[in-house]
Image: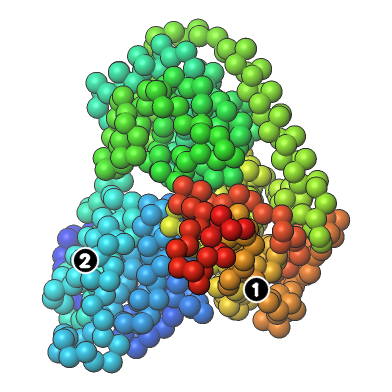
Amino acid sequence: MTEIETKNLTGTKVKMTPSEAIVETLVAEGVTHITGILGSAFMDMLDLLPTAGIRFIPVRHEQSAAHMADAYTRVSGIAGVVVGQNGPGITNMVTSVAAAYQAHTPMVVISPSAGTPTVGWDGFQECDQVSVFDAITKATVQVPHVSRVADCLRTAFRIAYAERGPVLFDIPRDLFYGELEDRILEPHQYRVDARGCGSMESLDKAAELLASAKYPVIISGRGTVDADGWEPVIGIADYLTAQTATSYMHNDAFPANHPLAVGPIGYMGSKAAMKTLAKADVILAIGTRLSVFGTLPCYDIDYWPKHAKIIQIDINPRNIARTHPVEVGIIGDAREASSELLKRLQAKDVNRKPNSKRLAEIAAVNQEWEAELVELAMVDGNPMNPRRALLELTKLLPEDAIVSSDIGNVSSTANGYLKFTQPRKHIAALTFGNTGFAYPAALGAKLGNPNCPVFAIVGDGAWGMSLHEVSTAVDQNIPVIACVFNNGAWCAEKKNQVDYYNNRFVGADINNPDFAELAKVMGANGIRVDNPEDLREALLNAMESDKPTVLDIQVDGTQLAPPFRKDALKMPTRFLSKYAHLDHKNW
């Protein structure tokens, strides 16, 4: 036992440096690795990591570091930690921290800043990082004095877990040095992980509403996964014989093989989910904020039931009724609230029988949707229909596979094809919608669960933003499989130019290198695929190799999904004569 561990038992403070206080606090928090790029600002802390048993994983770009931490947290439940050089190193993380913020992912960003003697002089690599990150973090915690280093880091972790999001731990670079007296606390001494079930009155009212509902439908979201809440949610669904959909891009929030599962709502989701949700008289939304984008019409189906009564369970009071008016709002943990709700329902009628008519209806609507997915996939493409590639991929995924998905035409189309029978398996880019997410997220997910095979679904545009991390995967021996759908364009945006701009393509086409050969140069496996038969063999070889692998999957760039945001686009109108030929009336 170390000196700190021994004296901690008696509550005695010990002398240590700020760097030691930081590292020992990270050890107490169960941090096993930190992602980032080394820099002089935090080198004193960095020097301690190997002895502390914390692995430093150097990435090629700091944006990747926070994407890795985001996915690691989603898979493991442990807050990821990232670090970078003050100034450009930290600002390179803006996009990925903003993505984690909108994904409600706990994370601590160790943010070295300009030294206290030089603040305000616009010196080398100086930036007001606190202001930059203020709107995309749950809090920015600044270290005011050497003696407060451990306390401030504890505060950062406390807020990250309590409010479910990233927190900036900003420390002037000179405050890594010096000495202080403090004791290292265990997490239970300064933060509480257990959450309540919500108000008894609200739970009673919700139970009454559900018990009397004629057509209840459940939407299960990320909160269910984070709270390990599958079991009580399944129990409620079984009791009510309620169709259960998953919220947008959280396909692992309910088991896809359950007879009541109808798949995901949201863009390119399941028509089975949308058709059943449209009939609901009561909606039970568990662990989901019911985002605007995730509930927009899709496939020209305006499926959201305007007069349904909504029961919303969310840990964050800000999310209750934020986008849709509710009949009952329950501020509580998804698992705890669902468990209490199930008890109340069962107490009303312990012998309630399954609704056989509804089960048959669900089976029929699911079968119809599955047939449509296959039919769409079997349409010939040149060289291959992207849907066919997705279909073959999902057939071959092992049951315990983790899949990260990017943003873009093919990645979003995957929403309809991806099915999971275990939680913490779907790691999607979500509503911040930045490209370049899926591959570094796959690396982080593999760190979070090294025993599971991990796949990244990435378009060629997003791959151009993340392929440099193949070097990281090779250097750090992180064997993930990148499924790069290569259609030679930014096809989500190209579809807008097809539908709204008369096939006038500006900035849409991409002239790609051979991604398979490039992967080999970087030390990974690289396989080029242009037909469904070879795809099967390539996937099996990739899984057997246990090496980082890039599948360069050649797909048809003319077979495109509908526009992301029909609500945000209009047919072009032009008033100046110079541009008159571009007016939609003149096509």
* Three-letter residue code for mark 2: Val
Compute the Cα span from label 1 to label 2: 42 Å
Q: Residue at x 26, y 81 (%)?
A: 127
Which of 375/343 is in front? 375
Mark 1 surroundings: few (<14), some (14-19) or many (≥20) residues within 10 A: some
Q: Is residue 402 visible?
A: no
Answer with left or right where residue 404 lies relative to residue 511: left
Answer with left or right where residue 457 lies relative to residue 331: right
Answer with left or right where residue 50 lies relative to residue 486: left
Query: Where's residue 425, x and y in %?
Result: 56, 49
Q: Residue at x 81, y 60 (%)?
A: 382
* Three-letter residue code for mark 1: Ile
Query: Where's residue 144, x and y in %?
Result: 13, 74
Q: Residue at x 41, y 11 (%)?
A: 212
- Toward the right, the furthest residue is 533
Q: Residue at x 17, y 60 (%)?
A: 11
Q: Which residue is mark 2?
A: 141
The first of marks 1 and 2 along the sequence is: 2
Query: Where's residue 191, x and y in %?
Result: 25, 51
Q: Is residue 101 above or below residue 475?
A: above
The image quadrant of residue 417 is top right
Which of 191/490 is in front? 490
Secondary element at tag 1: loop
Q: Which residue is mark 1?
A: 510
